[in-house]
Image: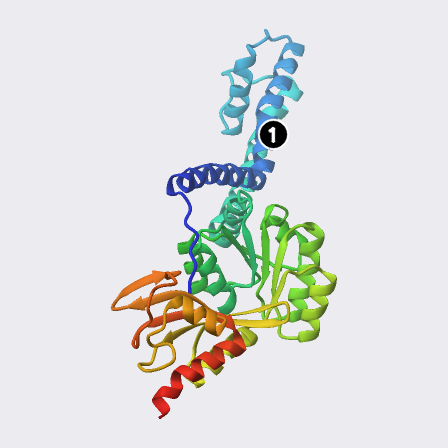
Amino acid sequence: MPSTRLVLPAGRRRRTRWIRSIRAVYRDSLALWREFRGPLLAFLIVVFGGGLLYGELRVLAGYPREAYLNLPYYILRMMILEPPSDTPPAEPYLIVFWYLMPIVAIFIVGRGAADFVRLFFDRSERRNAWEEAVASTYRNHVIILGVGHVGLRVTRTLVGMGFDVVAIDSKIKPDVDDELAQLGVPIIVADGRDPSSLEKAGLPQAQAFIACTSSDQTNLEVIMRARDMNPDIRIVARMWDDQYAKQMKQFMGVQAVLSASDLAAPVFAGSAVGIEITQTLHINGVDYSMIRLHVEPGSFLDGGTVGELQEANDMDIVLHGRDGAVEVQPHNTTQVKGGDTLVIFARHDRVINIVERNRSVTKK
């Protein structure tokens, strides 16, 4: 099968990766802050707010006013069971601080330690947060729902063409996870039918959405949400049911509804009769095919020029190969000889006729 590669300037992509990495670290730091902000905020309020209160209570008890910078230090000392001064206070409201601060410290540290242990042993939670942080930095990317056999191959192809890709799947196999990591594709492990999952994948900023799950109903439901969230996004769907396919094209503005079996059928059929079909297109109700053909010596192709053969057979010879040399869009005066390799594009019925006439020589 033919492959296509979009080549992007390497320097620009390196700069983009650096900028994206910085933005991802920033967003991940915000996510980490959200995880620990409760204990941290409580600690800061107790140390600074409690310090101010303790200082005012000392003044109320008749002690000289302490410098404000010393008050948080007093609270910290009380938290670790050390008195702020050698002489214990006699006032009950100051004694409360001496006994209350260690308890508050244990509570705050305990909350923070619990969150840390939870994140340490549940690595997937931090991993998901990082993947979401990376995905949030993408713009004009492609989102793929479902990274099974079809979705993973689509992902490989898009990455090979130079496009940014974000994947969504409710479950991820370890080998698929490893390959996505090697490809640099962030994966949102969540139910794609949940709008928040599409939001995390950056659907409002994406240029295309591909539904690749094996469930027509799931694809249909997510496509409806995707179209609602981004009316201008290009949508491509994998479908088994022809009725679903027609409805999606007609009512939801899906640009392409593809079936793996429909795409593979011409290739299987061509292989059965010795035709190597590399591409099939359906345009305005007409099927067009691109084939690679070995010119049989003595066939109607042998001895003709590219221009003559194209004119006489209503076809386009897009590539000519001979003895290891390849010419794309060969000149009309190039002569075709037996043993040459041609890549021909034409209507499917014309392709069948060309192949049959080329093979008829070997049948005599």
Q: Is residue 302 left or right of residue 238?
A: left
Q: Position of residue 97 (x, y in %)?
A: 61, 24
Q: Residue furthest left?
A: 323
Q: Is residue 331 left or right of residue 349?
A: left
Q: Which quadrant would residue 286 be assigned to in this image?
A: bottom right
Q: Is residue 92 left or right of residue 139?
A: right
Seen at 73% across and 64% down, the residue is: 250
Q: Position of residue 6 (x, y in %)?
A: 44, 52
Q: Which residue is mark 1?
A: 100
Q: Is residue 238 left or right of residue 330?
A: right
Q: Which quadrant would residue 276 be assigned to in this image?
A: bottom left
Q: Is residue 305 above or below residue 255?
A: below
For residue 340, say whether it is visible: yes
Q: Which quadrant of the figure contains the C terminus?
A: bottom left
Seen at 53% across and 45% down, the residue is: 138
- Amino acid type for the residue under numbered disc 1: Leu
Q: Is residue 182 above or below residue 273?
A: above
Q: Residue furthest bottom?
A: 364
Q: Is residue 75 above or below residue 249?
A: above
Q: Position of residue 203 (x, y in %)?
A: 62, 50
